[in-house]
Amino acid sequence: MTPSQSARRIILALALSSTAALPVSAMDLSSAYQNALQYDSELAAARASRNVQGENVELTRAGLMPKVSLSGSASHVDVEADRLADDSYVRNGLQLGLSQPLLAMEDYYAFRSSQSTVESADQNLVAAELELIFRTSDAYFSVLRALDDLGTARKAEDAFRRQWEQAKERFDVGLIAITEVHETKATYDSGKVTRINAQGQLDVSLEALQRITGKFIENIHPLDEKAELSADSLRPLPEIEQITFENNPTIKAAQAQLKAARENMDSKKAAFYPTLDLEASYGWNDFNGPSPQDDETREGVIGLSLTQPIYLGGANFAGSRQSRFQVEQAEQ
């Protein structure tokens, strides 16, 4: 089970433990998360980034695949010569070409690097999903905390108001001094300020949850205080650390990115290697005119092409050095 799947199970369990005391329109944790999945821009960007890297695999794979091309030409030629007779003819042609790389180490390592980059993007997407689960849950529980704080502040305010009223009554019958009345009034005013601040914090928490879900929220379902969630038994710290290193998507993404950087360095080094291609072509040409001789020709060619880079303006040296620095960056 992946980390995101485990987190989703926790959210589902918490949602099922919500009470039904509030109206049906109230939002629970599960619906908040489902809305966030559709609305959150950070998760959408992570999905798009993964799709971009997926297409990059196809782009780099193309360097290893055969290439087929078809070209055609039609031209009218006029020849004027001093010693020979003037000439005029029409030339038409078609050519079908095929090229298949047999030895292309630069393209091969580039393809391998793109695969590792996709693996890193996959893990980054998992990390974004987990981050969304955390942000949604944190915002949801912040609203619950704000509701509890507001309820406590309201009860305290009512209690301080009653103390103030009782102090006034006792002062009216001469049992206490006016200073005690002022003290209870100050306590009541302080409780009123606390209640106002708690109301403001609730509004802020609701707006924070609204920014994540994209839905206007007035009420949310509280959790059932009697709900019990099953949890794994406590494990020793070294075991927890090992599980973290094996399953943390951010660490996996960094490891995949390091692998991609090393394979990219191999690709840049391979820019110095020779390339070998199998090339085949079939052409048709038609000459209509007195000269060259009115004729139609067909020609098929197959062969090998070997290319050894010698100097590319320094691009191969710079690319090799840059790739080494990228590996160092990924290692750090």
Image (cartoon, rainbow, N blue to C red):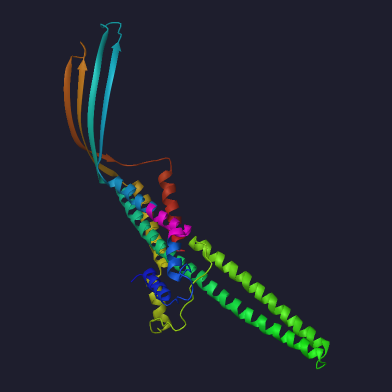
Q: Position of residue 39 (x, y in %)?
A: 46, 58
Residue 15 or residue 208, whichever sits in front: 15
Whether residue 101 is situated above or below residue 262 in the rendered picture: above
Residue 127 or residue 271, whichever sits in front: 127
The quadrant where residue 243 appears: bottom left
Q: Residue at x 48, y 62 (%)?
A: 213
Q: Which residues are magenta?
A: 38-51
Residue 294 or residue 313, whichever sits in front: 294
Quick check: 116 left or right of 133? left
Quick check: 38 left or right of 295? right
Whether residue 299 is in magenta: the answer is no
Whether residue 50 is in magenta: the answer is yes
Q: How many numbered marks does the figure carry?
A: 0
| Residue, far bottom | 175
Q: Residue at x 55, y 65 (%)?
A: 208
Q: Position of residue 115 (x, y in %)?
A: 33, 56
Whether residue 81 is situated above or below residue 207 in the rendered picture: above
